[in-house]
Structure formats: structure tokens, C-alpha cells
Amino acid sequence: MAGEKTAKGEVWTLAEVREGKLHSVSYELLAWGRTLADGLGVPLASVVLSGSESPPPESLFERGADRVYLTAAPELKNGLSDACAGVLSDMAEEYKPQILIASATTWGRSTMSILYAKRGCGLTADCTGLSIKDGALLQTRPAIGGNVMADIMTPDRRPQMCTVRPKSKGPLPPDSSRKGEVVRYSPRKSALASALTYLGFAPEARVGLPIQDAEVVVSGGKGMKGAKNFALLDELARLLGGSVGASRSAVDLGWAPHSSQVGLSGKSVTPRLYIACGISGAVQHLAGMSGADSVIAINTDPEAPIFGVADFGVVGSVLEILPRLIEDMKKGESR
Ligand SMILES: Cc1cc2nc3c(=O)[nH]c(=O)nc-3n(C[C@H](O)[C@H](O)[C@H](O)COP(=O)(O)OP(=O)(O)OC[C@H]3O[C@@H](n4cnc5c(N)ncnc54)[C@H](O)[C@@H]3O)c2cc1C
């Protein structure tokens, strides 16, 4: 019967709550989870851990969940990873899901790694593909600097656990006719214990949305020649209503924050428009932006690999082209 503690073998996704609201990665996970649950013929459930009041679960049903486990406790309000992992460990013991997937966000990664240590189950980080093979979870992720895709299975322990790279799959379209069952879970006091102290949340100063959510990403690489020239990218992004990204070289040089790094060891972005400025187009960079609808590249080297993935290419210096582009756009705006 639904929600009974005998409901073994479900596929679980770990919903992500930020400032009391469900974050969109929760729906991306459900899209992955739906495929896995259907492949196994088992229910798909989403686990919500939150402070005193849980966010409404309806949107999780609309995006594919059959069941939602709501766990609310004041100790979970700030998402301290050890408390969340303590509760999840108890829940996994009680309900015995066969698969648990979380998002490879900072919270998802830190919570799942503590859970992994508690339960001794396998954990594959930062997957970009998931499927079922011989009744077990097949986890695919880039390896060896993105040059190979590794298939990993952890079939011996339950749950099989992984984190999934945000934006590696879009959410299912909402279906308001889908309904599901809510199971309220009361955590043990001792499971909620935390060795961490929440100091506060300091949002980063940046232009526009986080790059993963932006419709336009203007990215700079080593060809930008210095941190001060990133002001050109800020200005262009502002004019286009977009956000600023960067290559790893630019981040390593301290020209842009790590949170703006696009690529294998940074973030995956899926904007409508990606503008690569002074970026060569190394395979590790392309791994993070190949989901863009359209790509414009500006580079002095006509042989730069970035032109191989660009819809429009401009051969020339960013230091000449960007100021002209910005000026033209401003003129267009004032007209
Ligand atoms: C395990 C691993 C993970 C990695 N992860 C990432 C990652 O997540 N993201 C990432 O980006 N990289 C990553 N890298 C690094 C990657 O291999 C490249 O070194 C990096 O992407 C290069 O950055 P870049 O294009 O800015 O610099 P470069 O490769 O040095 O290219 C600079 C480009 O600027 C052009 N240029 C120079 N002057 C101008 C000018 N005035 N105007 C226009 N163009 C100009 C040049 O022609 C050149 O094409 C990773 C590497 C490894 C080994």
C-alpha cells in the first residue's frame, strides 16, 4: 500500500529547498527519476527536507513524482548538510529506496557525501547520464579531463546514489492532472544533530541571474587580457539581460569568480545565446556550453576550436569589437 514502510525499492529524488521554496533542480531530478522508475516499474518519490513549514508538494506531482516525503523540523531550516544526511539515512533505512539521486549543487554534493559516509553505499558524483542496466543504475559521467565518458555501476549496496549535474536534463512539462500521495515523516531528534553553525547567507554580487539560469551568457577567456576588461562583458550582459561567464583560465587568473566558470569543472549552461569572447574552445570548456541554442565566438585566431561550435564567428580582437558592439547597442537602445 502506498506510503507503507514496506514500499521497498522506490526511486527517490532529493528536492532542493532554498529560502523556503523548491528550486528548479528538483524538477530536473524528477525528469531523470521518472525514466528510471518507469524502467524499473516502481514508484517515483521525492524527499523534501525543510524548516518548520514544507513548501507545497503539488508542483512535484505535476513534474512526475508519485509520492512526496515531507520532513519538516526547525533544525533543517538552513539545510545544514550533516543534519539533512542524518535524517536521510534514517529514512533510507526505514523505506529502503533502491536509488537516490540528488543535484550536484553545493548543497546536494555536501549532503550526499555525508550520507555516503553514514551508509557506506556507492556514490557517483556529477553524472550527466542515468539509465537502467540489468536492473541496476548505470551512471555516466565525464572522466579524464572530459576526454572519455565513464559508465559506473554500484550494484551491491542500496540505495544506489549519485549526484546529477544541473541542466543535464530539462524538467518534464507540468501536468496539473497528476496527483500523488504525501507521506509526512517525523525525524528522530538525534538524527537532526549538527556539528555545523549557520552564520548567514551572503548573495554574490554579479550581473543578472546565476549563469545556469540565464537566457544569455556572455563569457570571457584569457583573450580578454585582464580583469578590468571583464567590465566590457558586464556591460554587454546588462544590455542583453544576461549574465557573465568565464573560462577556467580566466577564473584561475582571478579575473572572474569561480561561480562563473563554464565547463567540465565548472557549470553547465543552456542559454538561448552564448557569446564566447577570447575563449579558445578547449574540450573541457565546450562540455559546459554545448547545450546553448546559439553560439557567437569572437577570437583573433581563425583556427580556434571555438569556431567549430559557433553559429556566428567574428575574427578579431575582443578589445576592439566589444566596445563597438556595446556602443552600437546603446545607440539602438536610445533610438
Ligand atoms: C580536468 C580539467 C578540467 C577543466 N575544466 C575546465 C572548465 O570547467 N572550464 C574551462 O573553461 N576550462 C577547463 N579546463 C581548462 C581547459 O583545458 C583550457 O585550458 C581552458 O578552457 C582555456 O581557457 P581560455 O580559452 O580562456 O584560454 P586559452 O586556451 O589560452 O585561449 C585564449 C584564446 O583567446 C584568443 N585571444 C587572444 N587574444 C585575443 C583578443 N584580443 N581577442 C580575441 N581573442 C583573443 C586566443 O586566440 C585563444 O584562442 C580544464 C582542464 C582540465 C585538465
Image (cartoon, grey):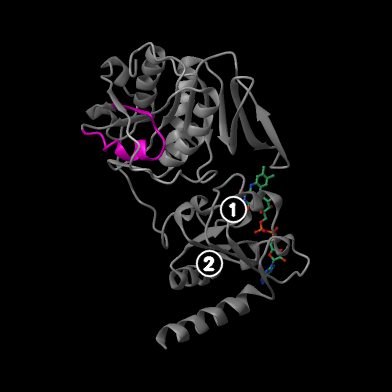
The answer to whether residue 194 is left or right of residue 127 is: left
First of labels 2, 1 by sequence position? 2
- The circle drawn on residue 311 is none
- Is 140 located above or below residue 313 in the figure? above
Residue lying at 51% horizontally and 83% vertically, measured from the top left: 327
Residue lying at 34% horizontally and 48% vertically, measured from the top left: 202
Report the amino acid beneath label 1: Gly
Please provide the residue range marked out in magenta.
53-70
Say whether residue 255 is visible.
Answer: no
- Is 191 located above or below residue 303 in the figure? above
- The circle drawn on residue 291 is 1
Report the amino acid beneath label 2: Phe
User: x, y (%) of residue 19?
Assistant: 29, 43
Q: Is mark 2 within 8 Å of ligand 1?
A: no
- Magenta span has 305? no
- Magenta span has 60? yes
Q: CA distance from mark 2 to mark 1?
A: 24 Å
- Residue 139: quarter of image: top right
The answer to whether residue 152 is left or right of residue 49 is: right
Residue lying at 73% horizontally and 42% vertically, measured from the top left: 147
Point out the frontmost of discs 2 and 1. 1
Q: How many C-alpha atoms fall within 10 Å of the one at disc 2: few (<14), some, or many (≥20)?
A: many
> Residue 142 versus residue 260: which sits nearer the camera?
142
User: x, y (%) of residue 47?
Assistant: 36, 28
Residue lying at 48% horizontally and 33% vertically, measured from the top left: 34
- The circle drawn on residue 230 is 2
